[in-house]
Amino acid sequence: MILPIVAFGDPVLRKKAVDIKEDHPDLDVLLENMFETMYGAHGIGLAAPQVGRSIRLFLVDATPFEDDEDLPEEERKMLSTFKKVFINAQILKEEGDEWAFNEGCLSIPDIREDVFRQETITIKYLDENFKEHTDTYSGIAARIIQHEYDHIEGILFTDKLSPLKKRLIKGKLNNISKGKVNIDYKMRFPNPKKKR
């Protein structure tokens, strides 16, 4: 089932999410719905707060990057199978030079900006079977994880922009929270404009 994606301005996007236990109710259904929701919105990552649940859960599927000719072949190959669930994740280390990449977010449609993030991360997490992993990722994979991880920390990519950029997009962000945006997927708006 496709769930509505929560739009910018909703308080759930600003909460630090809580850990979940293995017996979390209907987790398999939630994961299935989140993947379906992400694909329906043409996304490559989705965090639980984006569907209104303040829990430490996000998923990624970077397979669309396998066709990106601008990426080195080795990275494209890795991304072609990069589909994962991250539960109760903790980034242990971020290292390497910061680099810019144009990011967008399903909760903030029609806004894309260059965001600087470090090249490599080490992250500890549980998979969908609650098996623990500690993995290191670099490049696009690290960036997708960092973006989704920020969601479970109550951080949005727009928080990482310069004060000038933030001022320039303020009107667009207000419009998004009111539902004044053109999208082809289901969304839930915190301040929908009133119909006359």
Image: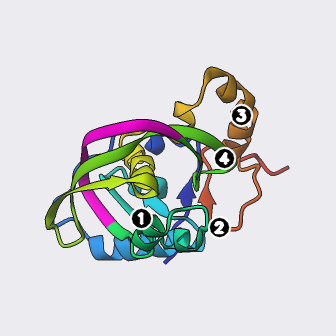
Amino acid at pointer 3: Ile
Q: Nearer the viewer, residue 121 or 14?
A: 121
Task: Determine which residue is flagged by label 2.
Answer: 185
Q: Residue at x 31, y 52 (%)?
A: 55
Pair 4/2: label in front? 4
CA gap, disc 4 and disc 2: 17 Å
SS at mark 3 in the image:
helix
Task: Determine which residue is flagged by label 4.
Answer: 112
Q: Is residue 94 magenta?
A: yes
Amino acid at pointer 1: Val
Q: Position of residue 25 (x, y in %)?
A: 24, 68
CA gap, disc 1 and disc 2: 18 Å
Amino acid at pointer 2: Tyr
Q: Nearer the viewer, residue 144 or 96?
A: 96
Task: Determine which residue is flagged by label 1.
Answer: 60
Q: Give the image quarter of residue 16.
A: top left
Q: Nearer the viewer, residue 102 or 172?
A: 102
Label for residue 169? 3
Pair 1/2: label in front? 1
Q: Position of residue 14 (x, y in %)?
A: 44, 38
CA gap, disc 1 and disc 4: 19 Å
SS at mark 2 in the image:
loop
Q: Which residues are magenta?
A: 85-99
Q: How is the image coloured?
A: rainbow
Residues at marks 1 and 4 touching, judged by CB atoms closer than 8 Å: no
| Disc with the residue nearer the chain's start (1 vs 2) | 1
CA gap, disc 2 and disc 3: 22 Å
| Disc with the residue nearer the chain's start (2 vs 3) | 3
Q: Main secondary structure of the magenta part?
A: strand
